[in-house]
Amino acid sequence: MKLECFLYDVRDSILVLTMNRPEVRNAWNRQMHTEYLEILKRVNNDDSIRVVILTGAPPAFSSGTDLKSFSKGVSSFESSLNEGGASQQITLMREFKKPIIAAINGAAVGMGITITLLCDIRIAAESATMCFRFTHLGLVPEFASPYMLPRIIGLGRAMELCLTARTIKAREALEMGLVSRVVPDDELMPAAMEIARNLASKKEHAVRMTREMLYRHLDTDFYTAVQHDARDFMEAVRKTFGGE
């Protein structure tokens, strides 16, 4: 697969996927959307890859949507998103078979932060900043972020970040629970790789099923969840130990 907008590096069953448009701070254009969808589809069906790390080529993680996409009007922008399969990307990330770690190495703005909400683990470099900048531009949050963000940090904090469009630093993001770990800049990728190797060392079905259960229970009532859990537990037992 020939890629123009990403670096694709597999190490020890771990894919390090790097957004690679540093000249525009890894802003997303039509080509980037198209390539990302192709990568997701390929990796989801590649049993040799157990974990994905998503990061950005310095100096930023991602500055969000490339506003040049608006240069030919709304219809051009809508076409760009449709052809890039944005809705397919959202669905596929939610139903992905492998865990995705976002290693936020710099500014994550707009889609640059909303895409991380569909990653399973988010860690940040000390110098990273994050901004849901949409209202500042007269826009609204996208990429399923109005659904995911309140579930991650709570409705009150989500309201503040999205309505004010203020920029927060990594330490505040950690306090909010938006990221689970903050490390010195030069330790970000080693930390991400350490987490990825930990996940890759586990039984594949156990990691996949646990991920599915946690997402499914976001929209499941307690009693239905209990019933599902019992079935999933026994399925995991059979996969691990064999037998009927």
Image (cartoon, helix red, strand yellow):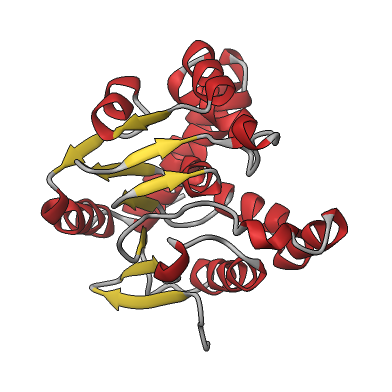
The quarter holding residue 170 reads top left
Q: Is residue 53 visible?
A: no
The residue positioned 50% from the left and 75% from the top of the image is 5
Residue 71 can be seen in this image = yes
Q: How many marks?
A: 0
Residue at the outermost front position: 71
144 lies above or below 101: above
Residue at 16% in and 50% down: 185
Pick out the residue farthest to the right: 75
Which residue does the image show at 52% across and 60% down from the upper left? 27
214 vs 184, nearest the viewer? 184
Hey, which residue is sitting farthest top in the picture? 156
Residue at (45, 74) in percent of width and height? 6
User: Residue lying furthest bottom in this view?
Assistant: 2
**How far from the left and from the top, in percent, is residue 202?**
26, 54
Counting from the top left corner in percent of width and height, residue 50 is at 36, 64
Task: Work out whether residue 17 or residue 110 is closer to the camera in this orientation and state it.
Answer: 110
**Residue 22: image location, x then y, percent:** 40, 68
Is the residue 152 above or below the residue 11 in the image?
Answer: above
Query: Camera-side residue: 2 or 214?
Result: 2
Specify whether 55 is left or right of 39.
left
Q: Position of residue 145 (x, y in %)?
A: 59, 35
Is residue 119 shown left or right of residue 87?
left
Image-quadrant location for residue 219: top right
- Residue 35 vs 136, above or below: the answer is below
